[in-house]
Image: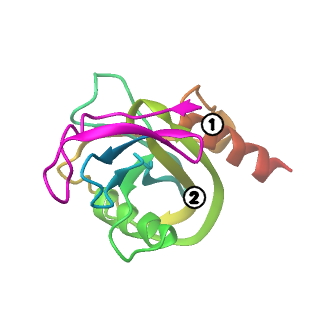
Amino acid sequence: MTEYIQGSYAFCAHCGAETKEEPIDGHLVKVCSKACGFAFFNNPTPVVAVIVETPDGVVLAHNVLWPQGMFSLITGYVDPLEVPEQTALRETKEELGLDARDVTFVGHYMFEAKNQLIIAFAVKAEGTIQLNHELDEYKLIPVDKLKGWPSATGQAVTDWLNQIVA
């Protein structure tokens, strides 16, 4: 049986009764002890990662909440009623002020530390970079100098580089 419950959910989100752990479809799940129907499966949150390619290189950005020197792709949560391709375009505009086009699916990856499903896309973008309040620094890395790293976003970079070389 797979156990992947995170978060407490000691009480039912629907009726307030205590919850208990119960096996459902091979997974240990928090369910309502009063049988109101609530079950907490802890499904991953969909997050889009965007490889933003400009004429000068790929944009890697530093989030204000991260340790100094840590740069990564542009990322963002998928909004309600939004498809991931729209998220890629929206996040590129919101975080970098760039107009993006040619959205290409790269792959999907688990970011287990935050229980997120990373859905990676590459876009071509133009304009002048204008960082929003979430970012405080960026780097432009020429495609021939870009290398992946061990995390989910870095795996996406590696896969994208393999796709464009193939």
Q: Position of residue 24 (x, y in %)?
A: 52, 46
Mark 2: which secondary structure?
strand
What's the colour scheme? rainbow
Report the residue that reaches farthest toward the top.
Answer: 68
Say which residue label 1 marks: 155
Is residue 84 rendered magenta in the image? no
Residue found 51% across the figure and 70% down from its top: 85
Quarter of the image where one finds residue 116: top left
Is residue 15 rendered magenta in the image? yes
Residue 56 visible in the current orientation: no
State left or right for residue 147 relative to residue 37.
right
Work out whether 111 lies above or below 35. Answer: above
State left or right for residue 13 relative to residue 113.
left
Residue found 37% across the figure and 69% down from its top: 90
Q: Position of residue 84 (x, y in %)?
A: 49, 67
Say which residue label 2 marks: 121
Q: CA distance from mark 1 to mark 2?
A: 12 Å
Between 55 and 117, the residue placed more toward the observer is 117
Mark 1: which secondary structure?
helix
Quarter of the image where one finds residue 162: top right
Q: Main secondary structure of the magenta part?
A: loop
Quarter of the image where one finds residue 9: top left
State the extent of the magenta-drawn residues as a range.
Answer: 1-28
Q: Earlier in the sequence, mark 1 or mark 2?
A: 2
Which residue type carries mark 2? Phe
Between 63 and 137, the residue placed more toward the observer is 63
